Image (cartoon, rainbow, N blue to C red):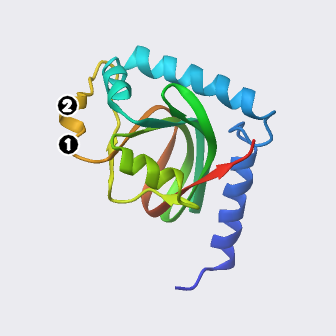
Amino acid sequence: MTISRRSLALGLGASGLLAACGNGVGSVGAPTIDARVDSTLSQMYSQFPGTVDLANKSTGMLVMPLVTEAGLGLGGAYGRGALRVGGATVDYYSMVKGSGGLQIGAQQYAHVLFFMTQDALQNFRYSPGWAAGANVEYATPERGETLAAETTTSLAPVIAVIFGQSGLRLGATLEGTKYTRIIP
């Protein structure tokens, strides 16, 4: 597949837009990330009470308070967050997502990965870079909708809850997401 100069320029422009969207790039470090994680969890528990039970049944949670995504032909996303085990932060991670296809727009959202098995959590923690794959069950609840941990835990070892979307991004794309441990 040949990538035109125009597509390359549009993709680089989208990357520049990501850096300017206040997504945690260049923040003051761990205290800022932890404060954003606490605020995100409070919002999620308040809006979607079923996630409290999901959190209690999980072995760990990766909380990405703000993910900024933009695309025009080529696109990308970036966010930073914290892995919590037993309610305490054990590591910090960045999330990078690349996409290509028919797309236009920008959006921001929060997401939480619930690790429902010890094996899934260990696989995540001890891999040099973890890519979201077929073993992730995505849930995008609307206001007032509940998530039942009893039904979802049997579906996948990792459950992703995406919420707080703002902005608009349209299109059909092929995407890849990678999480990497960082030192804030």
Amino acid type shown at disc 2: Glu
Q: Is residue 68 above or below residue 2?
A: above
Q: Is residue 142 visible?
A: no
Q: Residues within 10 Å of mark 1 (few under 14, many from 20)?
A: few
On the image, the x and y values in percent for residue 108 come to: 56, 38
Q: Is residue 60 above or below residue 12?
A: above
Q: Residues within 10 Å of mark 2 (few under 14, many from 20)?
A: few
Which disc, if any, is residue 154? 1
On the image, the x and y values in percent for residue 34 come to: 65, 27
Is 50 left or right of 130, judged from the image as shown? left
Q: Is residue 157 visible?
A: yes
Is 105 left or right of 155, judged from the image as shown? right
Q: CA distance from mark 2 to mark 1?
A: 7 Å
Which disc, if any, is residue 53? none
Q: Secondary structure at mark 1?
A: loop
Q: Are marks 2 and 1 in contact (CB under 8 Å)?
A: yes
Along the line of sight, the residue nearer the viewer: 90 or 27: 90
Along the line of sight, the residue nearer the viewer: 27 or 171: 27
Q: Residue furthest bottom?
A: 1
Quadrant assignment, res 113: top left
> Could you tell me which residue is drawn at 33 percent across and 59 percent down?
134
Which disc, if any, is residue 150? 2
> Could you tell me which residue is drawn at 68 percent across and 39 percent down?
23
On the image, the x and y values in percent for residue 8 come to: 67, 72
> Could you tell me which residue is drawn at 18 percent across and 35 percent down?
151
Q: Secondary structure at mark 2?
A: helix
On the image, the x and y values in percent for residue 184 come to: 75, 41
